[in-house]
Image (spheres, grey):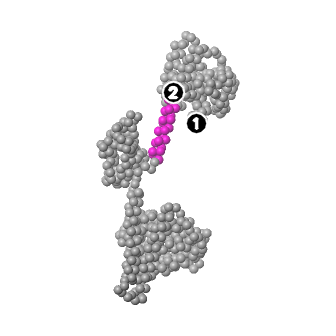
Amino acid sequence: MLMRPDLRTQQRDFLLGITRAITAQLDQSEVLRRVLHASLAMLAGRVGIVALTDRADGKLVIRAYSGINADVVPQLNHLLHELMSARDDDGFSREYLNAKLQEMADAIDKRLEQSIAMPLVFAGNPLGLLIVFRSYHTAITPEDLSALQSFADQAAIAVNNAQLYGEIAHERKRLAAILNSSGDGVFTMSPDLRFLQVNAAFERMTGWRNAEAIDRHKSEIINWARLDSPDIEQALEAGWAATDARDDQRESLYVEGDLIRRDSSELSIGITYAPLRSAEGRLVSIIGNVRDITNFRKAQEMQSLFISTVHHELRTPIAIIKGYASTLGRNDVEWDYDTVRNYVAIIEEETDRLTALVEDLLTASKIQATRELQLNIADTDLHAVAAQSVARLESGVSQVIVLSFPEDFPVIQGDAARLRQVIDNLLTNAIKYSPAKSTITVGGRYSRTTVTVFVRDEGPGIASDQLERIFERFYRIDDRLTRRTQGTGLGLYLARAIVQTHGGDISVKSAVGSGSTFYFSLPRG
């Protein structure tokens, strides 16, 4: 007997009290602690175990215990696994269950004489097993079993609720971690456009912290310096999130423009709004995803400038070639030899210029498409390659070009044609931006493992904030001299790609008013 017959009322009161206390909790650890405490008190037990079913593999695993040394728990888990493995559609036999419980009692303390196991089941779903061991043996009446079963049912409800709460809490933390680690800003708003939550990226973009943004109206947080299309307010007025809206009107809404941040600076962003609805179709909240499109816009501007520049760069040599060819082809004029020779030289020069431009465009396209360059590796004398570049480019220029290589400059393994393209680009830039009668130096030095080639000019120099970007595709320095100078913004991009494909590095040292020196280093091996 659990209690004397004259204590039945106290038993019911006790059972009611502990079930209320258990079901009031949502923390699983605390629920299991209370279940153990109550079961040991009801049954005058010495040892208690709560084992729950692992949802991943269906095994019973001890989640709470009392009166047991921790080093015994693995052995008990093994016995519980054997017990579950023997289970079939009809469960397992009472004899087998009693045998396993006796093995568990012996593993804990051979002085334990009786074990009582109560399954924890909720809505037909087995959640686990509650086991109490006693150091004495006594009979259990049907009334006692009924009371125990009632307690086990209430304990199962509490465990189920705690598990659901734990899963919800875990999912909430997981989503919060995802949102806060996202590079995009994310926020939620109520249907009346008041902020409910923002993530860390949104805080960085706008300058509004989550605690400050909550319950503020969108008009206080998101102010536009420029907007390319109607925002969410106009979309809502047009029925974008109406319950009876067509499916195409329930799709996400995208707007972009320049946001005025909290510190009054501006940031180019794109916002994607998506409606979150209840089962009845009612608008519950609006989710917004904010992306910084500053670099995208800069890339678009650079590409537009590139297309315009290439158009000009292609038309100029073509027009010159056509003009001189047409002049030479006139039937009403007899040209002398020197004139023909000069005109042909100009046509050849412009053809070379056009060929170089087309080659740069094709090379850039290949790099973007395949992320690599094909090299024809052979013995390469960079001193000789540099001398060829100087000889080709120094005629007709107003600067003085000086070669400065040591006599024993080593031969390396490389693609001579590609490396000449690098030197040509660096030398061409130096000529473009250097004043007349200034000196341009093309030189080299070497160590035990590397060779380095440099091109030094006495031009206007480069601002420090632009040094990191000059090797980007299509990028051109934004100053008056650059705008007066022809170029596609591909030369340094291609030079870096060629050098890096050789396993080397390219860099620049420069300061405004002090000229620039470009270096590229290659391995000797």
Q: Which quarter of the image is occupied by the N terminus?
A: top right
Measured as percent of width and height from the top left, residue 14 is found at: 52, 18
SS majority, magenta: helix
Residue lying at 47% horizontally and 47% vertically, measured from the top left: 181
Q: Residues within 10 Å of mark 2 (few under 14, many from 20)?
A: many
Q: Nearer the viewer, mark 2 or mark 1?
A: 1
Q: Quadrant of residue 357?
A: bottom left
- The answer to the question of whether label 2 and label 1 lie on touching residues, with beta carbons closer than 8 A, is no
Q: Quadrant of residue 235?
A: top left
Say if residue 481 shows up in the picture.
Answer: no
Going by the image, does 85 lie left or right of 311? right
Give the magenta range. Answer: 157-181
Amino acid at circle 2: Ala
- Badge 1 is on which residue? 56
Measured as percent of width and height from the top left, residue 238 is found at: 30, 43
Say if residue 338 shows up in the picture.
Answer: yes
Comparing 200 with 476, the one in front is 476
Measured as percent of width and height from the top left, residue 138 is found at: 64, 16
Q: Outermost residue toward the top?
A: 6
Comparing 15 with 363, the one in front is 363
Going by the image, does 81 lie left or right of 23? right
Q: CA distance from mark 2 to mark 1?
A: 21 Å
Measured as percent of width and height from the top left, residue 515 is found at: 43, 72
Q: Quick check: 285 above or below 266?
A: above
- Badge 2 is on which residue? 158
